[in-house]
Image (cartoon, rainbow, N blue to C red):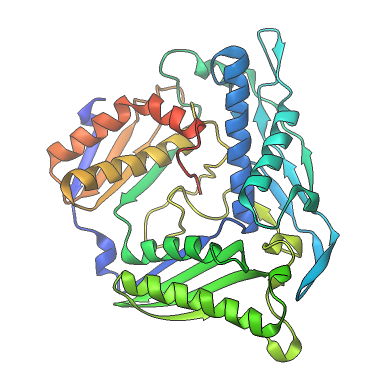
Amino acid sequence: MNKDRTDIEQTKDPIKNDSIEIVERKGLGHPDSICDGIAESVSQALCEAYMDKFGHVLHHNTDEVQLVAGSSKPEIGGGKQEEKIYILLTGRATNQFEGKTVNVNRVAKNAAREYIEQNFKELSTDHIEFESKIGETSTDLKTVFEGEVPESNDTSFGVGHAPLSRTEKTVKRIEKQVRNISEIGEDVKVMAIRRGEKIDLTVASAVIASRISSKKEYREALEKVEETAEEIAQEEGLSTEVEVNTADDYEEDSIYITETGTSAEMGDDGSVGRGNRVNGLITPNRPMSLEAASGKNPVTHVGKIYNLLAQEIAVDIYERSGEFAQVKIISEIGQKIDTPQRVGVKTGASEQTVEKAVEKQFSSITELTQEIINGEHSTF
């Protein structure tokens, strides 16, 4: 890559000068995250189907998954589902190519079902009605896949930074660890506000009704959540106050219990791209792209590739130098994906370090594509 396309600005991590930092993560079972996960799984399944039949990935974008919440009556010790969750798979994909056909909608529904079965404790395909309405893609966009290095099919940008701040690391760790508590479902949302060295944490945790037998056990489950959050924050060097399931009203018997471990069963809808960025967080103190990366094709869609690549470059710079790095990459439709319009880097690292990291990551951009297809990179 031509180094003249790279702009470097010397700076330290600006977050350290912010007296207030806000960080959020929508957990694996949040309705928006369910859509993200399914969209990405559908894309990976289509990539596999195209590779098997044609030897290369064909054009597709499956980033339009919609979730309509169901209806349920959870009760301590059990409960029942009255209306199924409805999940609509939409987007565009190549159904026919060189006289051969891929049953896109069948591949998509199978991938969605498999994702649910592999990632949730209690939520299953029995709780969900799936429908797939993925349409045929534009013929013009198919042409950008030709050639050894594909062309960008959009003008877009990607953003990444490294390392994560203490608040960012705390939020990611809490969501993951809380999901490991047996009584807690996958719908865990963590909101953090750091003021100086103190962090206020609000955690919403869907308790699985069949895994508790009393309000006492419900409270004990929430105590485990609180203890987990406090311990992680302290390990990151932050004093903390933790609030868990703050909307509970014990006098009115209104507590956050679910049959499936997700609020999608009883009122919360979801959509791709409304939650976490590719680093797994929502970080209003940082520059962010609003791209819905999950489900976009990993070969030519820079809205996906450049967000992940920007993150890889930032991590590379940090690992080489120990200095903070923030990376922005902008593309131009029709140009090779290894030839961006500009790369902007803010960092404390040397110019030589930045150039080495940028060159290395862009020279292996097609390897990144394969890693995405293999599921080696999270998009939410």
Residue at left 61%, top 50%? 119
Front position in the image: 134 or 243: 243
Residue at 52 percent of width and 42 percent of height: 293
Direction from residue 215 to residue 172 in the image, left or right: left
Is residue 245 among the parts visible in the rendering?
no
Vertical comparison of 341 with 72: above or below: above
Looking at this view, name the residue that lies furthest to the bottom.
251
Q: From the viewer's perspective, is 361 left or right of 296?
A: left
Q: Is residue 69 above or below residue 253?
A: above
Quadrant where the N terminus is found in the figure: top left
User: Where is residue 306 drawn, in percent x and y?
Assistant: 41, 37
Q: Quadrant of residue 60?
A: top right
Residue 128: image location, x then y, percent: 78, 50
Number of dots carrying numbers: 0
Residue 316 horizontal/vertical position (percent): 26, 41
Q: Relative to residue 168, is residue 196 drawn left or right?
A: left
Q: Residue at x 69, y 74 (%)?
A: 212
Q: Residue at x 67, y 55 (%)?
A: 270
Residue 379 at x, y = what percent? 49, 44
Q: Nearer the viewer, residue 13 or 85?
A: 85
Q: Residue 359's quadrant in the figure?
A: top left
Residue at the extreme top of the image, as rendered = 99
